[in-house]
Amino acid sequence: MAPNGPRHRRWATAALVAFLIVTVAACNSSTPRPSGSTAPIGTGPVPQPTHWPSLTVDSTIALGVADPQFQQIGADLTAAVDANDLSRLLQVSANAETFLAGNQTNIPRLQDYDGTQAVGDRLAAAYAQLVAGIKQIHDSLASGDGAGVTAGFQTFAAGNTAYAAVRPDLLALAAAALDQKRKFNL
């Protein structure tokens, strides 16, 4: 019988299949397994990055985007006081109150998520002072209460100081929230 006959082809095919099986088995067994593990590689839980609740992401971004406006509020208040323009100060304080109260609605969403709660709590305290102070300034101006205006500015300044202390953490969270938005399409 010639070496290229049907018997030779079956034997060659069987040898090739056996060689492939041995090669595949050798490749798989050469992969190091974790110590003490009998499970095949890649069968355990795969760690997934934790994503924040989408409302937390959106609220954190909104608060971060609002941050530069604080400088404008301060500049507008200072300009109105320096010009001794009470009608302008009334308008600026009304606008600031609307701005702050609108932003304040985002804070509970930070407080509701463990990963942002501490910053949310600090922001809540700072915003409470800012809103109370600006409201007192506005209401005291409208009623002609000079002592109330002064007290309002003191409360507002305390809130501004508290906000300045939490600001770096807020901006870091806002950057992380933007990253969450990109990674998870939130």
Image (cartoon, helix red, strand yellow):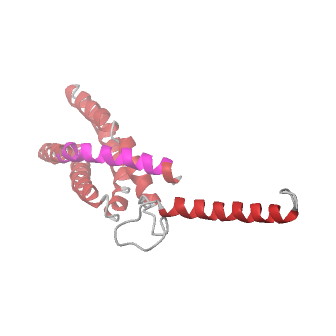
Kindly indicate the quadrant of the structure image that contains residue 138. Answer: top left
Taking the spot 70% from the left edge, 63% from the top edge, the residue there is 15
Q: Position of residue 126 (x, y in %)?
A: 22, 51
Nearest the eye: 84 or 115: 115
Q: Is residue 14 above or below residue 125?
A: below
Quadrant housing the N terminus: bottom right
Taking the spot 41% from the left edge, 53% from the top edge, the residue there is 59
Nearest the eye: 86 or 10: 10
Q: Position of residue 12 (x, y in %)?
A: 75, 60
Q: Which is the main secondary structure of the residues drawn in magenta?
A: helix
157 relative position to 38: left or right = left
Kindly indicate the quadrant of the structure image that contains residue 21. Answer: bottom right
Q: Is residue 115 above or below residue 147?
A: below
Q: Position of residue 8 (x, y in %)?
A: 81, 62
Q: Residue extending furthest front?
A: 1
81 relative position to 44: left or right = left
Q: Is residue 94 above or below residue 89?
A: below
Nearest the eye: 13 or 178: 13
Nearest the eye: 177 or 28: 28
Residue 97 in sight here = no
Q: Position of residue 4 (x, y in %)?
A: 85, 56
24 relative position to 143: left or right = right
Taking the spot 21% from the left edge, 28% from the top edge, the residue there is 84
Q: Is residue 36 magenta?
A: no
Taking the spot 43% from the left edge, 47% from the top edge, the residue there is 179
Residue 161 in sight here = yes
Report the number of numbered marks: 0
Task: Write down the region rendered in magenta.
Answer: 162-182
Kindly indicate the quadrant of the structure image that contains residue 85. Answer: top left
